Amino acid sequence: MSFFEKLGNLAMRVVSNQVFLQRRLPISCTSSYRYARSKVNADDLRSLPEKPKKPLTPYFRFMAEMRPELKKSHPDCKVTELVRLLADKWEKFPQETKQKYLEDYKKDLLAYSNVKNKYEMQLTDDQKQLLKRAKDEMVAAKENRKLKKKMKDLGKPRKPGSAFIIFFNSKLSGRGDAPYKEWVRTLAKEWSNMPPELKATYQREHSSAMESHRRQIQEWEERMIRMGHIDVVRSEALIEPKVTSRKVLRTRLVEKNK
């Protein structure tokens, strides 16, 4: 089966399977599908009854107790070094002492479970739905951050800056000792008053950079599909592949195999 036949079959699977669409395509592509409503307002969350906090696990309880003393004896230590020292100290702790931390944690966990049940019973249906939406948004945001990191690690081409950013970068070397905020305000004013014909040169440079970026993205997505990283590919590249784009891809594949 050729690459384009595989791509076509994959597109059909995406179109016919909404679960696949939600799970495999980037969060940025499916957010409107999954969260048609507006995002949860922070003020709405603050209006809810105070939620009980989970007890600290044995290790984190140990860290909370030992950290002030360790920081006092090692005032110049960085946070990462303190964490390493605490981890070493925990490893050398007697097992019976660790067991005591564990027993205390279990007692607190039981008490927390009772308080949590009472808390949930006092919530209205609307408040429960609000909490669920907030949790879903947190999960989606976490997935999105992981996806963006994956794209970066896989070498996704960066989108070029706007015409103003190109103008901004061209002026960096002439900043001198001017305060940054004042210098930026001056540049913004210069850009606003710039003659249209001069501004057009930066806009043409931006258009050229965007065209190059589109080609780079197309090549990168082709490579990601072949490698099996479908989750980093735009939905339109899978669902609505353009005929011209497919011809370009086919030509490139033929040229590579010569």
Image (cartoon, rainbow, N blue to C red):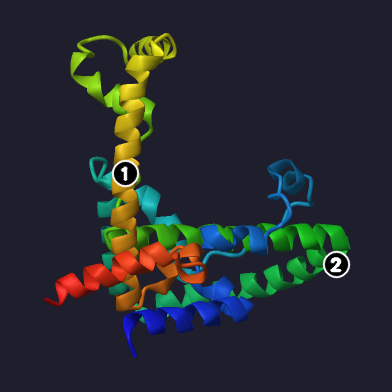
Secondary structure beneath dot 1 equals: helix
Q: Is residue 82 above or below residue 128?
A: above
Q: Earlier in the sequence, mark 1 or mark 2?
A: 1
Q: For the point 15% across and 77% down, which residue is it? A: 257
Q: For the point 76% across and 57% down, which residue is it? A: 130
Front residue of this view, candidates 94 and 257: 257
Front residue of this view, candidates 45 and 181: 181
Viewer-nearest of labels 1 and 2? 2
Q: Is residue 40 visible?
A: yes
Secondary structure beneath dot 2 equals: helix
Q: Position of residue 206 (x, y in %)?
A: 33, 34
Residue that carries the numbered disc 1 in the rendered image = 72
The kind of residue tagged 2 is: Met
Horizontal side of 130 relative to 213 (left or right) equals right
Query: Disc 1 vs disc 2: Cβ atoms closer than 8 Å?
Result: no
Q: For the point 73% across and 41% down, which residue is it? A: 43
Residue that carries the numbered disc 2 in the rendered image = 121
- Quadrant containing the C terminus in the rendered view: bottom left
**The image quarter in which residue 179 lies:** top left
The kind of residue tagged 1 is: Lys
Q: Is residue 189 above or below residue 3?
A: above
